[in-house]
Amino acid sequence: MVYTVTFNPAIDYVVHTDELAVGMTNRSKSEQMYVGGKGINVSMVLAELGIKSKALGFVAGFTGRAIEDGAKEKGVETDFVHLENGNSRINVKIKSTEETELNGQGPSIPGKAIEELFAKLDGLKDGDILVLAGSIPDTLPSDIYEKILARLSDRKIKAVVDATKDLLLNVLKYKPFLIKPNNHELGEMFGVKLQTEDEIVAYAKKLREMGAVNVLISMAGDGAILVDENDKIHKCGVCKGIVKNSVGAGDSMVAGFIAGTAEKGDYEYALKLGTATGGATAFSDELAKQDEIYKLLAQLQ
């Protein structure tokens, strides 16, 4: 079973307008609402690929109920901790001549709720996959990823961690099955600016030496590189299409990689499916759909 954790899920309110005039009344041309958060995004895309998952995390108030209902409508099983106070956040994304975002803060998460989440995680069994993705709200301990993986370290659980800098570096001692920094984040971890594929591979191998089992480096328009558990290097180019949306593309790549390993147990195929799934989100107005994923996969085969 795949479990995803989203500490601070959101409703994304996307507004399209011709031109944003600061300090004036602006009117939208159209708007959409999407439920999300990195872990929930992974779960919704896994559902498109026929992989069952359970979404964990924290929700609060009427927005929390909407997030839970929206995830269920997309075929995701949920087991959120319901907070007694506050509301899950709304992120406003204004698409005009430039894109402007205003992300909500989210509810306060008390210690009692953290323990409730830990109790749910205690139910994971050998062979399960746990996806930890995204930043940590200020109301949670900064080492929450470490606490979770330490708690589960006595079981053969495959951890997938999609985070940046110290959040990622600090969990390598727990030997996560997959980490997915992009090339810029990889350089930031080591205080260098990476210029070539050889440099990217060299620093990806350093992360392997530090404990990561598989290291997937996304490089936007330059494709992706995987250094697998056998230190074999796999490279994949990008799919052809018009980029419409960057939100959720990285989460979709993670979902595609997980589905690919589950389907065939082959890392080269998993990299291609991950690339196609990320592209299917980037080329649409919402998260990837199954038909588009496999059309793009055919480009890479």
Image: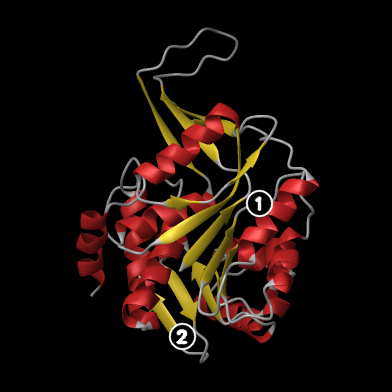
User: With 67 as the anchor, is 256 left or right in this view?
Assistant: left
Given residues 243 and 211, the one toward you in this image is 211
Question: What's under tag 2, amino acid-wise?
Answer: Ile
Label 1 belongs to which residue? 135
Can see residue 49? yes
Image position of 26 (left or right of 269): right
183 vs 269, nearest the viewer: 269
Residues under labels 2 and 1: Cα distance?
Answer: 28 Å
Towards the viewer: 247 or 115: 115
- Most extreme residue toward the top is 25
At mark 2, the secondary structure is strand
Residue 277 picture location, percent across and down: 34, 60
Q: Residue at x 58, y 15 (%)?
A: 22
| Mark 2 or 1, nearer chain start | 1
Q: Is residue 249 visible?
A: no
Please name the amino acid that badge 1 sits on: Ser
Residue pointed to by mark 2: 233
The answer to whether 67 is drawn above or below residue 174 in the figure is: above
Most distant residue in the bottom direction? 230
Q: What secondary structure is marked by label 1?
A: loop
